[in-house]
Image: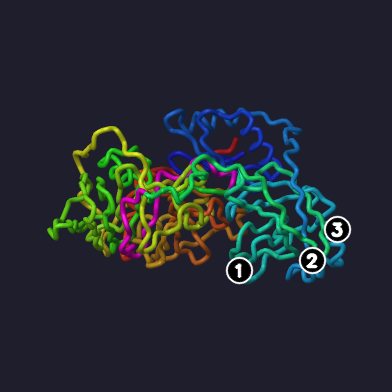
Amino acid sequence: MRFLSVSLDSFLIECHDLLETTRFFQHLQRVQHPAILDMIPAEKTILIQFSVFKTSQQQLIAWLSKQHVQDDVAVRGHTVVISVEYGGGDLNEVAERLGITTQALIQRHTQHEWKVAFIGFAPGFGYLNCESRPFGSVPRLDVPRKRIEAGSVALAGEYSGVYPKDSPGGWQLIGRTHTKMWDIERDPPALFVPGHTVIFKEAKQGTLVSVPDVVKPSHEQSIALDKMTNATLKILNVGMQTLIQDGGRMGQFSLGVGVGGALDQGAMRLANECVGNTANTAVLEILNGGFKAQVLAPTVVAVTGAIGECMIEYADTKVAVVASGQAIALDEGDKIQIKTPKMGLRNYLAIRGGVLVPSVLASRSFDTLAQLGPKPLCMGDEIVVGQMPKQAVSIPAEVTKWLPKSEETVVLDLILGPRTDWFEAKSVTVLFDQLWQVTNEMNRVGLRLHGAVALERSKHMELPSEGTVTGALQIPPNGQPVLFMNDHPLTGGYPVIATVASYHLDLVAQIPAGCWIKFNQISEFMDMNV
């Protein structure tokens, strides 16, 4: 095995093939090392996320290198049978490419058992592998489709898969099913996870029927929203984007779900501290100002993050400009307005008691890529808060004084890896020597950067999809980096040259378009063979 550096609290294990990866992943699931927080298995790699408070990277790698996995360690998991109506748009073409009839293709697909190797691309999207490789390697489409219907059964490479929701994609379509791959009202929401066995069964044209799933609602999801009448704020203007965010979803990698949560975690925690909430209580994340709300019931709020004007229009017509990072008492009829920031990009508005919406996978955050959680707020929406905390309001001693403005330069620390060796040595030098501009193509998934000199690869083979982390610098074929943010896909097929240090991710969340980034190397590339 190879151990490759990723970030301060994660690294990549590279195995010889999918079978070795699967067996080692299942072994690690069973032994459950107390310092391993989560894992992302892929075709030939396992991304390990660990607690730096419980172990060091060196100690954990030493423990992993001593593990002995028996050849028969892979055990048969839960079996899922999926009825498929064959006749997808690429069925005939794939059969012709393989030199067989469409019926022979269907028989190969249904007569073999498929194993869920890993989850990636989207929540509930399983990469299904068959050891006998009945189709060899099926090429992806040259031009991906802009929309593939949920339930589409497809082939790509040596894998089969079922699209869990409408989405773009480049796999070859051979059929469709009504079986839901992903249903947030189901427990668990993903129909299968790594290790499960899948059997496809042919259904005659027009005979597919939807089968109701067994639903196990959570306690919070069982709360009737029509009983939530104690609204505290009414949204008058959401600006560019206003989302409900908290500390994020932990431990959901096996379902294909990332952490997400507030992009500037420090600003979120500070806002909550000001009003007496616990650190990860749900708040409003406001992009680039333009937000306005009216108070419907007495409350205490705080605004943190980007630096700019926050105005209070009191019910008696008085107007006051308030500082960020402090508790603000408001009464019914008052209005709060957050203007476009002078420095930074995102504000966080905490309300005493926290924003109360049903949690999804133990979080109230909205994941923009996975489309999980409460939808973006709209004008006229009313905000309900939870039970008021009993502890006294706490006022922090210090608030951030500087955040970047457009055209300013921001210095970010980088950890090299896991695919630094896929690039020319001169490109690694360029990565740190030149400035990279933040383009207008930026959101919660990632920031597209542009440099005068593009990065060049030394290895041009296709990289099997592998786990990625927030802060990863993924390099697509054009050589211009994409800096992954909280809502990034869990797996990616372009090499990651380096990763931004976790302590600088809050700063990244506040970088507006037009800024320049200077990367600073803080570690050597780790490539350890065991």
Question: Few, some or many C-alpha atoms within 10 Å of disc 3 (few <14, some 14-19, many ≥20)?
Answer: some
Residue 96, given in percent of the width and then of the height, sits at 82, 70
The residue where tag 1 is placed is: 147
Check whether the beta carbons of the residues at disc 2 and disc 1 lie within 8 A of each other.
no
Question: Few, some or many C-alpha atoms within 10 Å of disc 2 (few <14, some 14-19, many ≥20)?
Answer: few
- Could you say which disc has been placed on residue 340 in the image? none
- Could you say which disc has been placed on residue 206 in the image? 2
Q: Secondary structure at mark 2?
A: loop
Q: Decide if residue 429 is in sight here.
A: yes
- For marks 2 and 1 on the same chain, the one whose residue lies earlier in the sequence: 1
In screen coordinates, is 499 left or right of 198? left
Residue at image coords 48%, 64%:
479
Residue at image coords 73%, 36%:
74
Considering the image in quadrants, where does the N terminus appear?
Answer: top right
Q: Which residues are magenta?
A: 230-255
Q: From the viewer's perspective, is the residue at label 2 or at label 3 nearer?
A: 2
Q: Secondary structure at mark 3?
A: helix
